[in-house]
Image: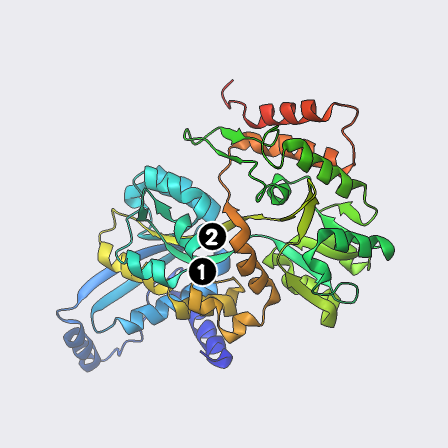
Amino acid sequence: MGKNLIKCLLAVSAISLLLSGCGKKTSTKDTSSEGTKKEESQNQGKEKVTLSLWAGEEDRDYIAVVTENFIKENSDKADITINWKPVIEGQCRGALLGDVLNAADVYTTTDGDIQSIVAGGAASPVLNPDEIRNNNLEASVNAVTIYDKIYGYPITADNGYFLYYNKEYLSEEDVKSLDKILSIAAKNKKKFAMDWSSGWYLYSFYGQTNLKLGLNKDGVTNFCTWNSKKGEITGTDVANALMRIGRNPGFENTEEWIKGFQKGKVIACVSGVWDETTIKNILGDNYAATILPSYTVAGKQIQMSCYFGYKMLGVNPYSKYLDWAHKLANYISNEENQKLRFEIRGQGPSNINASKSDEIKKSPAVQAVIAQSEFSELQRLGVNFWDPATEFGNQMAKGNTGGEDLQTLLDNTVKKIKASVVG
């Protein structure tokens, strides 16, 4: 679909949304009696279908175009009305489970909430599981697979992090190694920036070490072996590696890497697709992005990993028009509409063919996050992980234990991470 056509559709559809009350189907009718009779004749025998759709406010323009196209493409089969309501993905689960009988027929949610939605009986299994498996990245399908059934239609695969860097200082070979990045940064009195106050980022050093972290079957508490004394890589091995990085003059523990790039202080950072436009504008021709590097731990080079998230469309099993709800979700998630989502929203697709399109190949950030997904894990964590992880990450960034025995520090951190949320 050409960009001029997209702009035209956006303009028309945006007006339609405003006039029709958030995405309701609109049509141009002949007000003459002859026109009315003609329309009634055309619609006679057609099924009248009304569907409700929840998606984020930022998806307004995209949803307007896609739903209008869906209505047109199925106009010979049914008289369809689609009512869109802005609902933040993170709030979808609560709204859905709070009143599933009156909730949307189709809704946008995240991999972190789909399991709870399924457990609450608010997700209908997809009708075309083989098609979903064949057309989408394996990890995105796994994210919506619960008890061996697929309960959602993947639409994005971009909520992860990777490496941005300045080509003026770093080559494609240099950025394969964190040791090399830190060495070049220090030599040039620059910084590699990363936020160790966030356990989301800190996990990157553990993902490929066999030191485990995750959610117990109770769905509330965590298991964690970051203090393990067994295996080729122990808890103290990783902690010592972190402290070495923390002491390196080329490292900075911060979430202000954008300001660092602007001041010429930062030459590499760990972040996600949301920062691509800003960093690209700052670095210009020196802008680049790639997967995370390897780092040295216990004398080995270990590939850094990441937590990765996906968005998906779910279908309410209580929908009055269940088949049509599935058709709509499947349509929005197809290859062409994932390409359109990238053009309008800049979001990386889960569809395999869409991710290989020429336009998406031009985005180093999207290509980097897709490549990084090979070294990733779904985030499944209880609330007691975050505060201890922040304390531990900030301490490691100082390059020391604060006077505490290292193993004791690890044991206490893990104890807090694994603690019950009751009492």
Q: Please tell me which residue is depicted at 51% across the width and 42% down the height of the picture.
A: 379
Quadrant occupied by the N terminus: bottom left
| Residue 317 sits above or below residue 74 on the image | above
Picture colour scheme: rainbow
Which label number is shown at residue 388? none
Position of 136 with respect to 251 (left or right) is left
Q: Is residue 75 among what the camera can see? A: yes
Which label number is shown at residue 310? 2
Which percent across, then down, holds residue 59? 47, 60
Taking the view exactly as shown, the residue that stands out farthest to the left is 45
Residue on which the image places disc 1? 350
Residue type, mark 1 in image: Ser
Residue type, mark 2 in image: Tyr
Q: Secondary structure at mark 1?
A: loop
> Are the two marked residues, 2 and 1, in contact with CB atoms closer than 8 angstroms?
yes
First reached walking from the N terminus: tag 2 or tag 1? 2
Q: Please tell me which residue is depicted at 47% across the width and 54% down the height of the picture.
A: 56
Q: Nearer the viewer, residue 64 or 379?
A: 379
| Residue 55 sits above or below residue 114 on the image | below
